[in-house]
Amino acid sequence: MIALYIIGEPGVGKTTLMNGLLTNYRRGDARRLGGLLWGEPLHLSGQPLGVVLGRARGAFSGTDALGMAVQRDAVRWARHEAEGEVYGEGQRLANVAFLTALAERGRVLVLHLWGPAVAERQRRARGSQQAPSWLLGSRTRAVNLAAALRSEGIPLGRVGAGPAALHDARAQWEAFQAAVEV
C-alpha cells in the first residue's frame, strides 16, 4: 500500500491539487469502506488501482465531506484494510493518529500545500465566511501536524500554492513512488 495525503489551510487548493494529480484516473461512485468512512474507487486503464478517501461534492469535497465521527472507523480501515494506492486531502483525516495508522500498513507521503495569500484570495472568491481566528487555527494545525509527522518519521514534502503547485506535487509524488519501488 502506498498513500498520498495533502494537508493545508482552507482554500489553499488541496482539492484542486488532488484533482489535478488524478486527472488520468477514472473515479467510481463513492462507496462505504468501513463504518462512516467513504471513498471513491480509482481505476487506470480499466484496472482497479486504489481509492480516494471521502466524496466529491460541491465546495467541500474529499475528507471534508465525511462525518465528524469518522476517525475511529478511518484508523481501523487504515490499519487493517487499506490497499493499493490511497489518496486523501482535507482536514477531517489530517491528524497523527490516522496518518501513522496508514503508515503502519504501507508507505505514506504527506504534502503540505502552503500559501496563505493564495488561500485568502480563494476563500474570498468563493465567499467563505469562516472566522479569522478559526482560519488562523487551521493554518497552525497544518503547520503543527507537519512537525509532528516529521517527528514520527513520515515523509513530508512542501508545495507552494499557485501555478507551479501541480508540477511540484507531481514531481515529489513520482519520486516517492520510484523510491518505494526500489
Image: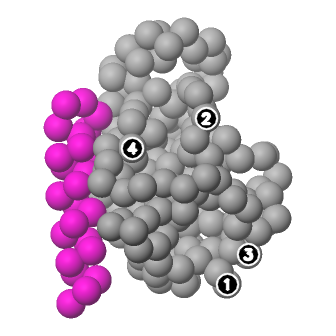
Within 10 angstroms of label 2, few (less than 14), some, or many (20 or more) residues?
few
Badge 2 element: loop
Nearest-to-viewer mark from 3 and 4: 4
Q: Quadrant of the C terminus?
A: bottom left
> Which one is nearer the viewer's eye here, 25 or 38?
25
Q: Is residue 126 magenta?
A: no
Residue 139 percent coordinates (x, y): 49, 35
Question: Which residue occupies 33% across, 67% down?
Answer: 45
User: Is 164 colored magenta in this rendering?
Assistant: yes
Between the C-alphas of marks 3 and 1, the distance is: 6 Å
- The answer to which of marks 2 and 4 sits earlier in the sequence is 4
Checking the image for residue 76, the label placed there is: 3
Do labels 3 and 1 touch, CB within 8 Å?
Answer: yes
Residue 15: % across, % down: 45, 39
Residue farthest to the bottom? Answer: 182
* Chain-order first, disc 4 or disc 1: 4
Can residue 146 be spotted in the picture? no
In the image, residue 80 above or below residue 155: below
Q: Calculate the distance from the C-alpha at mark 3 to the C-alpha at mark 2.
A: 25 Å
- Distance from the alpha carbon under mark 4 to that under mark 1: 26 Å
Q: Which residue is mark 4?
A: 19
- Give the prevailing secondary structure in the magenta stretch: helix
Disc 1 marks a residue whose amino acid type is His
